[in-house]
Image: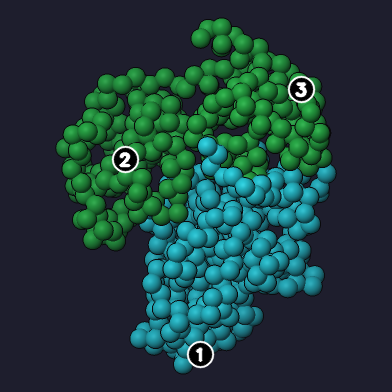
Chain colours: A green, B cyan
Amino acid sequence: MLLARMSLLGAVLGLMLKVISSSSPPLPVFPEGISEWRLAERATFDRSNLFDFIDGGAEVYLAYDFRHLSVALYRAAEKPDIAVELYDMGSSDDAYGVLSVDPTGEHVELGTMARYGAGLLRLCKGRWFIRILAERETRQSRGAVLDLGASMGATIAEDSLPPRLLGLLPKEGLRADSATYFHTLTTLNQLYYLSDGNLLGLGPDNEAVLAEYEARTGDAKLLIVRYPSEEHCLSARDMFVTRYLEVDASVQVALIHRVEETGFVGIQAAPPYLIVVLDGLERSLVETLLERTIASLARGEEDG
Amino acid sequence: MADHDGDLGLTRRDFLRQAGLATLAGLAGWRLLEGAEPALFSTKNPLARVVLARDRNVLGADGTPDARAVRRVIALGVQALTEKRDARTAWRHLFRASDVVGVKFSRCTWMRVPTHQEVIDAVLDGLRTVPVPDGKMHTKDSGLPARDCTALVNVTCLKAHPLTGFAGAIKNYINFHPKPDHYHHDNSGKLGEVWLRPEVKGKTRLIVLDLLTPYFGTGPQIDPRYRAHYGGVLLATDPVAADTVALRLCQQLRDRYKGKPWPLSPPPFFLAAADKEYRLGTSDPKRINLVRLGWKEGALV
């Protein structure tokens, strides 16, 4: 399949193949081979032509600080092809973010956040997000995929820590592998459609996390946005309250409102943070989540 | 600063409140606090007929389709769709030997969810029984000369999609527009518009939705965990009805995988617009007669 893709784009790729310039960040090394697989083809893309590689889906990466993509194809006789995609996401936070759009999967020990499932390994280390996909999962291809991940990860000196904002999520009730770090409306709508307009004033300058919570009284979603300024934060709160909750914007503290279509919604500004609880079946759960988040943010600020 | 200023558009609440859209939201797995589960696929007063044909043996253990089984399933499906006595008569009911037929499939190599070649080949075999000569069949994804065609067959596959919610029959025609990305704006609500382009309008005689291994997961690239061995095809003449059934299936596959609701997001606005604004067919599940053939286990719709 990837062969077909490579053939299809062959002429275009010929023009796009570039030598990585000396000003680019050090590129993790693609090994020449793993087990019986050998490096067969390579291509590179940047923000200007990512659509040539992911036609109709590049927006998902462009919603983060995507810089550069290097693609490699490994082949072995009578074995499934293995495709490696190496994304420079500009920062370790954004590398983590793009992986966290779907944080589920088998946790594999590669010294960094890594998830495996059915032939696909996704991992992030430093500013790099790596996808390694075997065209078909076999015992051998699984081994090769994991070895490739380990090998490439070992060439990356940068550390990977989850974005600080994730550490501010209240721990109690947080569903495992449910938190996504992001910036823009594109990603939010992929996770939880709120509006086609930008009600929360999201953009590349803010950080946001969306996570799921479980409680005896039902589930809810918690959204925390850290804005670049208090003004942005309060403006977003007012917009959300008037346009989405359709109530008076003169709210000064926490507001919990029953939205007949989706359950209870809570919102509270603690500039520069805005906290929104969505889809709460019970008012008490929304109240508790807001309180716990405020406390967690306060502790986080104290800890620096 | 903000990535989308200006018009604040349709909110989640608006979507759930508007008649018609709420039904769609229910099909897309959204929790409706005060809405009942939508009535599905009734045979009373249908506006559209959709055939789901499945075969347990159409896929090998490694997921490779059996070409003969695919041909058999599609032949049965076309026959049931047209209610004719045999497949050849059914194909002749839909196409004439004088037709120039465009077979529009989906390559989608970047996402690795293309229309299976076995499905495309089975359609071509069916057209040959009309008989449409090979020289009068154009089989392509992009660059199909729709202007030269008197008839079109829409042969695509079902996949969840990060920008449109899901992709099926309606979205398959996106590249009849010279700038396909144009339709990814405004929540992809205008996707149906491409069906009204002069070179396309009114030419689609058959829709074959490849459900051999539908993709129901997150994007943009494939994650093989979210690929179902479903072993079916969906046949229709109404693209909106076909996509409405496909949407329901996609959502059911998602919920089954997670063991809890896993709503599609963003919602497929284009489907409601294709019905209400572009009048391409019906998205009302109560007005769709779904005929089910073959393998029943795990059908989900």
Vertical position of residue B103 compared to residue A44: above or below: below
Q: What residue occupies the far top of the structure in this picture?
A: A302
Residue at mark 3 to residue at mark 2: CA–CA distance: 43 Å
User: Does residue B215 appear to the left or right of B46 in the view shown?
Assistant: left
SS for tag 3? loop
What amino acid is found at the position of numbered circle 1 in the picture?
A: Arg
Vertical position of residue B2 compared to residue B194: above or below: above
Determine which residue is flagged by label 2. Answer: A68
What amino acid is found at the position of numbered circle 2 in the picture?
A: His
Mark number for residue A276? Answer: none
Determine which residue is flagged by label 1. Answer: B96
Q: Please report whichever mark, 3 or 2, sits nearer to the chain's N-terminal start.
A: 2
Judge the density around disc 2: few (<14), some (14-19), many (≥20) Cα neighbours within 10 Å. many
Image mark 3: chain: A
Between B268 and B188, the one nearer to me in the picture: B188
Between A72 and B229, the one nearer to me in the picture: A72
Q: Are callouts 3 and 2 both on one chain?
A: yes
Residue A234 rendering spot, x and y as whole percentages: 67, 27
Q: What residue occupies the far bottom of the structure in this picture?
A: B98
SS for tag 2? strand
